[in-house]
Amino acid sequence: MSDSINFTQKVQISPSAVYYALTNAMALRQWFCDSSSVRAVVGGSYFVDWNIGYYAVGEFTALEADKRVAFTWQGKGEPGVTQVEYTLEPAGDDTIIHLQHSGIGSGETWETVRQQFQENWESALENLKSVLETGLDLRIMRRPMLGVYPMPLTEESAKKLGVPVTEGTHLTGVVDGLGAQAAGLQSGDVIINVDGKVVRDFSSMVAALAPFHGGDTVEVVFYRGSEKHTVNMTLSKRPEPDRPTSPSEFAEALRLGKAEVEAELDVLLAGLPEEIATQRPEPEEWSIKENLAHLIWTEHWNQMWLWGAVGGDDSIPWPDNGAMHLAPTLATHQMVVELLAELKTAHAETVAAAAALPASFIERKASAITMALVLNGLPPHTRQHIDQMRRALESIRAAPLIA
């Protein structure tokens, strides 16, 4: 014997927009899962995965554009294959989504799986409604903020920082006015524990924060060099991101942000000798020219990401910050003035790409918000590297052989 569970969700958007959200890999990541691969044809396969270690696979058994989506479902650890079917019912300008998950067996194991299906589908459909109507992913909006710029901790960076651990979240900076700064954390700290839970990497830190909301206080343990510290940190609420209303307005905002960082770079690099710009302050640290090459490459990567997102697939991985992605730019732009000019050209290209966005992309609220978050994050990222270049310059000029 088998059982089924049924759900209904009304959304204020067209059936075609709902159908896209159910069958596009990028759209699925915006409301449903953390990673996905989809071949949306009858008999085509799909794979959806969550950072908690759960995944599901199956194949499409029925696809009727803007009307019906059906597929098999086999989740990790589940005792058998089940079936999922969406039907989309037009209701004026709205859509009523009917979801049935069937083929659920009997017995203790199946009952546990059934309860998980019930809870997870209710949460997912609530988030689908939010993402389609407002562009806001509740999985993110309900997550509190520490206010940190994290990066993976490696054996090399741990040694450089002087911390006695090789697992944790390495902070490259903190956000002004948010919880981490208020609690006294700073660049170079390594968080190893949150609320009594071990932090091995950024994902485990996010998992430790999952039960909390903005305004809650948690205990955070971190290393600053070889010294261990414990602080109580008040978590910040996550502000609602702005959603671009038109390509031209968004492009102009990008242009203004880039003009500000270009002005800062003009002042910092004016009259800088080539030999100083080429020198690394430490063997493991980038030179000023390497920082500039990295910023150029970052602009090109974001342009590729934007092109992919407009086309319906933003799964363009960021490679390690290794020498290989810097080498072509450094080989073809050997002087500081050339690198700075190329960076300004890359800035202009990103602005032009934003201005050329199709209106249909802006209408996908979640995609527009994600794009704005990614591209608006570039000026702060550039300023981090400006600070690195400034510190490198001060270090080199203070060294006895350069003074």
Image (tube, rainbow, N blue to C red):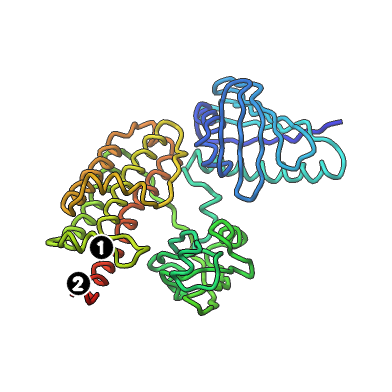
Q: Nearer the viewer, residue 377 or 322?
A: 322
Q: Residues within 10 Å of mark 1 (few under 14, many from 20)?
A: some
Q: Quadrant of the C terminus?
A: bottom left
Marks 1 and 2 sit apart, C-alpha to C-alpha, by 10 Å
- Point 50% across, 69% down: residue: 190
Q: Quadrant of residue 48?
A: top right
Residue 307 drawn above or below residue 271: above
- Point 52% across, 60% down: residue: 144
Q: Quadrant of residue 289?
A: bottom left
Residue 197 coordinates in the image, percent (x, y): 63, 66
Say which residue label 1 marks.
279
Residue 318 coordinates in the image, percent (x, y): 43, 46
Q: Nearer the viewer, residue 219 or 39?
A: 39
Q: Nearer the viewer, residue 390 or 145?
A: 390
First in sequence: mark 1 or mark 2?
1
Q: Are marks 1 and 2 in contact (CB under 8 Å)?
A: yes
**What residue type is disc 2 on?**
Ile
Residue 37 drawn above or below residue 178: above
Number of numbered discs visible in the structure rendering: 2
Residue 122 coordinates in the image, percent (x, y): 66, 43
Q: Residue lying furthest front in this view?
A: 401
Residue 271 coordinates in the image, percent (x, y): 12, 62
- Point 36% across, 51% down: residue: 323
- Asked whether, in this view, residue 295 is left or right of residue 155, the answer is left
Q: Residues within 10 Å of mark 2 (few under 14, many from 20)?
A: few
**What residue type is disc 1 on?**
Gln
Say which residue label 2 marks.
402
Residue 19 drawn above or below residue 376: above
Mark carried by residue 227? none
Residue 56 drawn above or below residue 266: above
